Amino acid sequence: MLLETPEPVLPHAHLEELYLSTFPRVAAFVKSMQGNLEDARDIFQDALVIYLEKAQRGQLAVYQSEQSYLLGIVKHLWIRKFRRDAPKVSLDDAEQTINLEDAYFPLVNETRLLQILEQSGKRCLDLLRAFYYQNLSMKKIAAFLGFKSERSATVQKYKCLEKLRNVVKEKSISYEEFFE
């Protein structure tokens, strides 16, 4: 429901009432967005100017209340200010300050992993290395390691992985133990 828009020029008393009833909400919003009282005053003054200009031109479309309308203007202005004032960091600078490997990929405790892999036997180690590290197809692995068919190599890979799972279960090794 569209509320009645105020007179083209707001009387001083109405403007003061609008200021007193709306500013506390504006200050709370700005504070919640890491702003300070000075920011709240500046943004609110700008919002009031926009509100008054729209009122003078007869372009106000107030659906809830004047306070809500003003708060909406404040939110838009704050977001615009935040985008404008936010520090811009070039990707080159960010790349130098953040080492993604260290930040997101924990170092694998390779010796621990290798010890467990070696327990599965040389043939399993060769098969898993060919599949996971060298990215060879099962057909090439079968030919390279002397399996009768691609299917036998696949079955052997499954058995090797099961062996490794059992070793990990038997020794009660947790996932975290593989990382430093």
Image (spheres, rainbow, N blue to C red):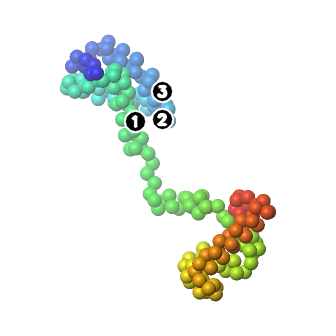
**Label 2: element kind:** loop
Q: Which residue is mark 1?
A: 78
Q: Residue furthest right?
A: 171
User: Which of the pair 25/141 is nearer the observer?
Assistant: 141
Please provide percent x and percent y for residue 139. 55, 82
Label 3 and label 1: CA atoms lie apart by 13 Å
Where, quadrant-wise, is the N terminus in this rendering? top left
Where, quadrant-wise, is the C terminus in this rendering? bottom right
Identified by mark 1, the residue type is Trp
Mark 2 and mark 1 residues within 8 Å of each other at the beta carbon: yes
Q: Earlier in the sequence, mark 2 or mark 1?
A: 2
Label 3 and label 2: CA atoms lie apart by 9 Å
Please provide percent x and percent y for residue 128. 64, 75
**Label 3: element kind:** helix
Q: Which residue is mark 2?
A: 33
**57 versus 153 height, above or below:** above
**Label 1: element kind:** helix
Q: Earlier in the sequence, mark 3 or mark 2?
A: 3
Identified by mark 3, the residue type is Ala
Q: Horizontally, is 9 left or right of 18 in the view?
A: left
Quadrant in the rendering for residue 127: bottom right
Residue 28, disc: 3
Q: Residue furthest left?
A: 57
**80 versus 37 height, above or below:** below
User: Quick check: can you spot residue 111?
Assistant: no
Identify the residue at horizontal 66%, vertical 64% (top origin).
107
Please provide percent x and percent y for residue 46. 34, 30
**48 versus 118 height, above or below:** above
Q: Residues within 10 Å of mark 3 (few under 14, many from 20)?
A: some
Q: Residues within 10 Å of mark 1 (few under 14, many from 20)?
A: many
Label 2 and label 1: CA atoms lie apart by 9 Å
Identify the residue at horizontal 75%, vertical 65% (top origin).
166
